[in-house]
Amino acid sequence: MDRDHQISRIVLATGMIALGVLGIVYGDFALQWQPVPASLPFRTALAYVAAIVMLAGGIALLFRKTTAIATRVLFAYLVLWVLLRASTIAAAPSVEATWLGVGEIVVLMTGGWVLFARYADLPEGSWLRFATGARGIRGAQLLFGVALIPIGLSHIVYIPQTAALVPAWLPDRTGWAYLTGAGQIAAGLGVLFSILPRVAAVAEASMLTLFTLLVWVPAVVAAPTTRLPWTALCMSWAIAASAWVIAGSMPRAARPAVDESVLTSRAT
């Protein structure tokens, strides 16, 4: 594993661990990010199971010997999470917030997909091998690009709500709401159409990291005993971590070839 891949794997592992700890502390799913009906039988028990999967999976990602099994389990778990969240679109397809919620979970899943594609080490003949290797990584990158578009649109559709989250010490909070929304859409398009894709992915990951640090860390400090800020902090952290995994999977720009004849002439 090279250094970039190691760092992105560890960052996503810490995000999953944080979500697991949160689930165990509250004995519940991650509020609006995981739409599990209150009427579901054994709901609390299932919430603990989900939390343990994230906690154990995140810890397992930290160690080379358990990385393969961790990526398999977490990828399956995240795909299930996306499917659960996507089911809400049928109930309210014209509500942008619904697409926002799906987009956020898809971003989280794509990071898990890259790790799965890279480290799952599936046996020959496995029907899931199509989702591994370079083809799997590219699929995750494209899905990441698609997911950023509804996330960016939500900033523009819900300008008052987005502006309210901008730190008060920043001037023109409405302007920042428009700027961040446009930036996320541009990053998604950059990844989708291979227009400086690594730059686009790094910019998105940096933006999500800043959201975590500037919006949700202060929210937790202001209300340390309230559940929602902690949930938002852990979710934002995990989503930003997935974006860094995607950024790390993007190929670096190739260095221009050096003309050896030029070097020779200079040496002489």
Image: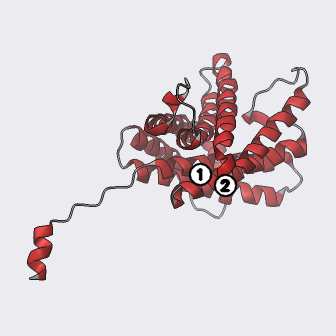
Q: Disc 1 marks which amino acid?
A: Leu
Position in image of residue 99 (x %, y %)? 60, 29
Residue 201 appears in the picture as rendered: yes
Give the quadrant of the C terminus: bottom left
Q: Disc 2 marks which amino acid?
A: Thr
Instruction: Identify the residue at the far front of this view.
Output: 124
Query: Which dot marks residue 130?
Result: none
Do residues under tags 2 and 1 come within 8 Å of each other at their CB atoms? yes
Q: Residue at x 82, y 46 (%)?
A: 22
What is the quadrant of residue 209 in the picture?
bottom right
Query: Which dot marks residue 208?
Result: 1
Instruction: Identify the residue at the far bottom of this view.
Output: 268
Name the residue that disc number 2 marks.
212
- SS label for mark 1: helix
Position in image of residue 256 (x %, y %)? 24, 60
Depth order, front residue of 174/32: 32
Left or right: residue 15 compared with residue 173: right
Left or right: residue 248 compared with residue 75: left
Q: Residue at x 53, y 49 (%)?
A: 180
- SS label for mark 2: helix
Position in image of residue 174 (x %, y %)? 57, 50
> Where is 255 relative to 95, above or below?
below
> For mark 1, does the 10 Å Cα neighbourhood hold few (<14), some (14 to 19), or many (20 or more) residues?
many
* Spatial CA span between label 2 and label 1: 6 Å
What is the quadrant of residue 168 in the picture?
bottom right
> Where is 51 relative to 258, above or below?
above
Depth order, front residue of 197/258: 258
Position in image of residue 41 (x %, y %)? 90, 20
